[in-house]
């Protein structure tokens, strides 16, 4: 980061980008894997008093208002009440491919496994296995990632219909392929040129475009084009 940008961000921190925060954290000694992104980094609070006690894996998505802690100052209360100094330590570890929902708090010593989803507003303490969906205060495992995927699959098409219906109510026309957002796999021809021609967005934050395209190409559409989808579901 050049000097002018450092000065700019000092006086206007709201313009901090994810890459700025990642560079700063790495400079302080925090372990962060490739592809990890911070959404609205100005609103995120990361405890860097003990950078060697924080590890964040690859392709994590940490959203607005999150707090990640590596220390606990409750020792000050104990010192005054019991006249004893009791230090505390616990390494906070976030695995690979973890999504942390808005305004969640990750407490000192928490270990979150790989491929986990943390629900919005969760207060997370403890050790959580790979492939878990975690939510609540205190947070607990609410289902496995496999179970969550099956729930999402069961609702996917109905949500696509709702999405298109609400778009029509707002604009008095049907959305095009690009405007259908993440629902394009339902009807788009499996062709790389088609993705370009329809301006399909595959540059998802915290993911790899080529992997998204390969995932799309290896699947099968349910409908023969967007009009077929509309004709069947939105008569």
Image: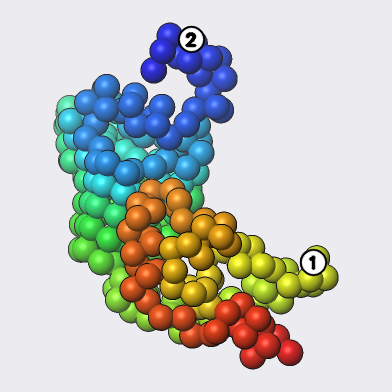
> Where does label 2 land, which residue?
4
Residue 78 location in percent, x, y?
Answer: 25, 33
Examine the rendered structure and indicate whether residue 186 appears above or below residue 124: below
Which quadrant of the structure image shows residue 175? bottom right
Which label is found at residue 104? Answer: none
Which label is found at residue 170? Answer: 1
Residue sitting farthest toward the front? 193
- Using a 10 Å C-alpha cutoff, classify the residue at mark 2 as few (fewer than 14 neighbours), some (14 to 19) or many (20 or more): few
Q: Nearer the viewer, residue 35 or 24?
A: 35
Which quadrant of the structure image shows residue 55? top left
**Mark closest to the chain's N terminus, 2 or 1:** 2
Examine the rendered structure and indicate whether residue 166 appears above or below residue 69: below
Q: Nearer the viewer, residue 92 or 130?
A: 130
Examine the rendered structure and indicate whether residue 150 appears above or below residue 93: below
The residue sitting at 45% across, 51% down in the picture is 203
- Using a 10 Å C-alpha cutoff, classify the residue at mark 1 as few (fewer than 14 neighbours), some (14 to 19) or many (20 or more): few
Residue 141 location in percent, x, y?
Answer: 31, 68
């Amino acid at each position: 980061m050049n000097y002018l940008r450092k000065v700019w961000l000092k006086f206007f921190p709201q313009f901090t980008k994810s890459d700025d925060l990642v560079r700063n954290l790495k400079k302080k000694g925090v372990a962060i894997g490739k592809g990890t992104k911070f959404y609205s980094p100005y609103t995120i609070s990361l405890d860097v008093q003990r950078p060697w006690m924080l590890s964040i894996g690859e392709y994590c998505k940490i959203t607005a208002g999150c707090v990640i802690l590596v220390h606990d100052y409750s020792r000050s209360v104990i010192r005054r009440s019991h006249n004893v100094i009791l230090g505390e330590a616990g390494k906070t570890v976030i695995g690979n491919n973890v999504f942390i929902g808005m305004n969640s708090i990750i407490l000192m010593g928490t270990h979150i496994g790989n491929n986990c989803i943390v629900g919005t507003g969760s207060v997370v303490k403890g050790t959580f296995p790979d492939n878990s969906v975690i939510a609540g205060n205190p947070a607990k495992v609410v289902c496995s990632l496999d179970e969550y995927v099956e729930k999402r699959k069961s609702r996917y098409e109905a949500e696509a219909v709702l999405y298109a219906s609400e778009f029509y109510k707002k604009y008095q026309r049907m959305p095009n392929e690009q405007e259908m957002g993440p629902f394009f796999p339902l009807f788009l021809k499996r062709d790389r040129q088609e993705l370009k021609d329809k301006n399909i967005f595959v540059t998802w934050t915290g993911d790899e475009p080529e992997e998204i395209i390969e995932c799309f190409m290896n699947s099968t559409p349910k409908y023969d084009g967007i009009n077929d989808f509309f004709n069947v579901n939105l008569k």
